[in-house]
Image (spheres, rainbow, N blue to C red):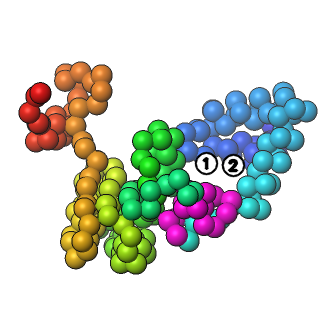
Amino acid sequence: MASQEIEALSSALARLPGLGPRSARRAVLWLVKHRESALPALLEALAGVAETLVECQTCGNVDTSDPCAICTDPRRDGRALCVVEEVSDVWALDRARLFPGRYHVLGGRLSALDGIAPENLNIASLLARVESGGIDEVVLAMNATLEGQTTAHYIAERLEAFPLRVTQLAHGLPVGGELDYLDEGTLAQALRARRPVG
């Protein structure tokens, strides 16, 4: 049996996504073993984030400044706006460095089962950003789930009143994917989105 403090740390780590009780215990053991070098750096990083972390009032991203680094970057194309469900989606897309514009985080997706309605998401602030002008294209980058596609459809309908192009990420076969390993929904979407060769 470990001490109450070590058990509390293990329990706290186990609540993080991707870490279960066993992985949390291994992390705690590693921290204990490397406490002179790893623990102070980890504590300092956690304290720094706790003191400075804010939500960007413009896009909903999480950063240490408001507005965030993406919103204030002059190299970004302010005419293109990519709408995503969560902050993790911004980070994933931005890590790929393929989208030159700015982002808007909804903070979730529509879900009747979970009681999440349009007013529970950052849709009003999205519409206000579009209404203020200067945006030529809105890219709907929702997850390929029923709720994600319902959210994309709802937003596309709300954006019909504005003179801009509304696009959506393509869905279908992944690069390197083999047909016999794909689910029926992915195959159906790939067939619907087929295009001419050449």
Quarter of the image containing the C terminus? Answer: top left
Determine if the magenta segment contains residue 48.
Answer: no
Give left or right: position of 153 versus 14.
left
Q: Amino acid at mark 2?
A: Ala
Q: Amino acid at mark 1?
A: Arg
Toward the viewer: 133 or 55?
Answer: 133
Give left or right: position of 112 versus 18.
left
Can the viewer see residue 111? no
> What residue do we see at 61% from left, 57% from top?
69
The part of the chain drawn in magenta is 58-72
In the rendering, at what x and y percent does residue 97 appear?
47, 41
Determine if the magenta segment contains residue 62.
Answer: yes
User: Which residue carries the number 2 mark?
Assistant: 12
Please rate how many residues cluster around mark 1, counting C-alpha atoms within 10 Å: few if below 14, some from 14 to 19, many from 20. few
Please identify the dominant SS of the magenta region.
loop
Dots 2, 1 in contact, CB < 8 A: yes
Q: Mark 2: which secondary structure?
A: helix
Please rate how many residues cluster around mark 2, counting C-alpha atoms within 10 Å: few if below 14, some from 14 to 19, many from 20. few
